[in-house]
Image (cartoon, rainbow, N blue to C red):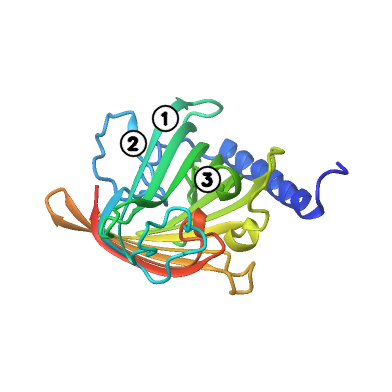
Amino acid sequence: MNNIRPKQFNQNILLTGLFIVTSGYAAHAYADEPLSTSINNSLNYDSNNALLLEQYKDNFVLPFYYTQSPNYKEYQSVIPEDGKLSNYNVNFQISLKYRLFSGILYDNDQLYFAYTQRSNWQAYASSAFFRDTEYEPSVFWTFPTKTTYTNGFHYVSSTLGLVHESNGRGGEQERSWNRAFIDMTFKKDALTLSIKPWARLDFGAKDYNKDINSYLGYGRISMNWNIDGKTMITFTVRNALESSFSRGYEKVTLNFPIYKRLRGYLIFESGYGISISDYNHYDNAGGIGFSF
């Protein structure tokens, strides 16, 4: 106990308490169909999908993605001979989940493994190279529930999980952290609200980014607005209150139909930590492309 810092100890108490509360609530909730919507993927593209491999977060390709202030200090080792980083990139994300088990403790709980990867490709530069790639494997246990509350926001699920996030590099260029999280989801008609606190885990390895919590915070809040089941607007904020609005991050996305299964995707991001390599760098970015 003496080796645990007070702030870390308080975080552990918070997570433990939330785990007990949410697990206890799930145990007393009425069993329901597995939740077909979540804050990460609230558009139900195919209700009869029998595939074991499912979409987790948004999957997209942005042929046009603009970053206002490239982080020269962070990427100096990969800058080509012309000494330039292009503001214009191709940005894409792949995110999938696989259900490992169902009905572990209750009729409708589910254990998943998920993997998300997002890359920033300098495709329009004289030397087309990948400026940055972010890797995020995770495992999580979700408890969908059925409630009979008022017409206001009502509780629909709890998710307990572990996640590793890294830029895949080693040594002094390593940017990574491990977290335990609880995701509590609420819903009202077409609106879905997710409150996701987390605590950083220390496994004793050398820490190359000790101040990462100061920039990426201790949780995030996200809200989806599902318009007629076809168009999705999402707003996400992180590290706003914790940093007194000095090191926050905001993101707005628009996922909309174009033709048949072809969908458009717009994203606007601002703040610290657009990627984990830029966790302590402020930037503004935006892109347009397609989701799948």
Rendered location of residue 23, percent (x, y): 61, 39
| Amino acid marked by disc 1 | Arg
| Amino acid marked by disc 3 | Glu
Q: In the orientation shown, which residue stands out farthest toward the front?
A: 81
Residue 184 sits above or below residue 47 on the image: below
Q: Quadrant of residue 49?
A: top left
- Few, some or many residues within 10 Å of mark 3 (<14, 14–19, 20+): some
CA gap between label 1 and label 3 equals 20 Å
Of pointers 3 and 2, the one earlier in the residue sequence:
2
| Amino acid marked by disc 2 | Glu
Which dot marks residue 44? none
Question: Mark 3 = which residue?
Answer: 165
CA gap between label 2 and label 1 equals 8 Å
Of pointers 1 and 3, the one earlier in the residue sequence:
1
Q: In the orientation shown, which residue stands out farthest toward the bottom?
A: 245
What SS does tag 1 mark? strand
Q: Quadrant of residue 27?
A: top right
Residue at x 47% of width, y 64% of height: 72
Rendered location of residue 260, percent (x, y): 12, 50
Rendered location of residue 98, percent (x, y): 40, 31
- Few, some or many residues within 10 Å of mark 2 (<14, 14–19, 20+): some
Please state which of residues 33 and 202 is positioned toward the viewer in this rendering. 202
Specify whether residue 49 is in view: yes
Q: Do the CB atoms of the residues marked 2 and 1 lie less than 8 Å apart? A: yes
Which dot marks residue 99? 1
Q: Quadrant of residue 195?
A: bottom right
Please state which of residues 227 and 197 is positioned toward the viewer in this rendering. 197
Specify whether residue 158 is in view: no
Question: Mark 2 = which residue?
Answer: 54
What SS does tag 2 mark? strand
In the rendered structure, the answer to whether residue 266 lies left or right of residue 176 reads left
